[in-house]
Image (spheres, rainbow, N blue to C red):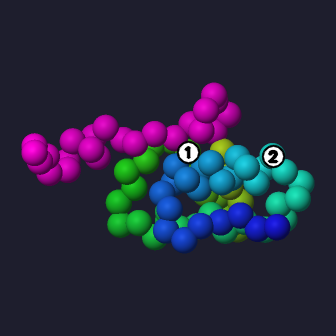
């Protein structure tokens, strides 16, 4: 079985990595899509090492969140 994504954020890839690491039935992983983003709005989460090695945070939950400073840069629209 393989786990991966198409164009999901680092939060989704972090969740996918947690799933993959929790199951011996998942043999292949494709977690590189966040590396294609022009900007990374996510703090924490999956860490990409050399040769395709990944690490996930050793804290409760996913260990990933949307960076407040990135959100503050966005245009605000009030409807």
| Magenta residue check for 75 | yes
Report the residue at 84% width, 51% height from top: 23
Residue occupied by mark 1: 45
Q: Earlier in the sequence, mark 1 or mark 2?
A: 2
Q: Residue 79, percent across and down?
A: 10, 45
- For this view, does 68 lie left or right of residue 43? left
Q: Residue 4, percent across and down?
A: 65, 66
Q: Secondary structure at mark 2?
A: loop
Relative vertical location of residue 54 with respect to residue 38 in this rendering, above or below: above
Report the residue at 59% width, 67% height from top: 5
Corner quadrant of residue 58: top right
Report the residue at 52% width, 41% height from top: 64
Report the magenta residues as a range: 57-79
The numbered disc on residue 74 is: none
Q: Secondary structure at mark 1?
A: loop
Can you see residue 47?
no
Residue occupied by mark 2: 22
Q: Tag 1: Cα neighbours inside 10 Å, few (<14), some, or many (≥20)? A: many
Report the residue at 70% width, 47% height from top: 18
Relative vertical location of residue 18 with respect to residue 58 in this rendering, above or below: below
């Amino acid at each position: 079985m393989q786990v991966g994504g198409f164009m999901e954020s680092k939060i989704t890839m972090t969740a996918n990595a947690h799933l993959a690491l929790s199951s011996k039935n998942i043999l292949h992983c494709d977690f590189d899509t966040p590396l294609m983003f022009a900007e990374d709005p996510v703090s924490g989460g999956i860490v990409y090492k050399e040769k395709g090695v990944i690490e996930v945070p050793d804290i409760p939950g996913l260990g990933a969140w949307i960076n407040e400073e990135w959100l503050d840069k966005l245009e605000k629209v009030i409807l």
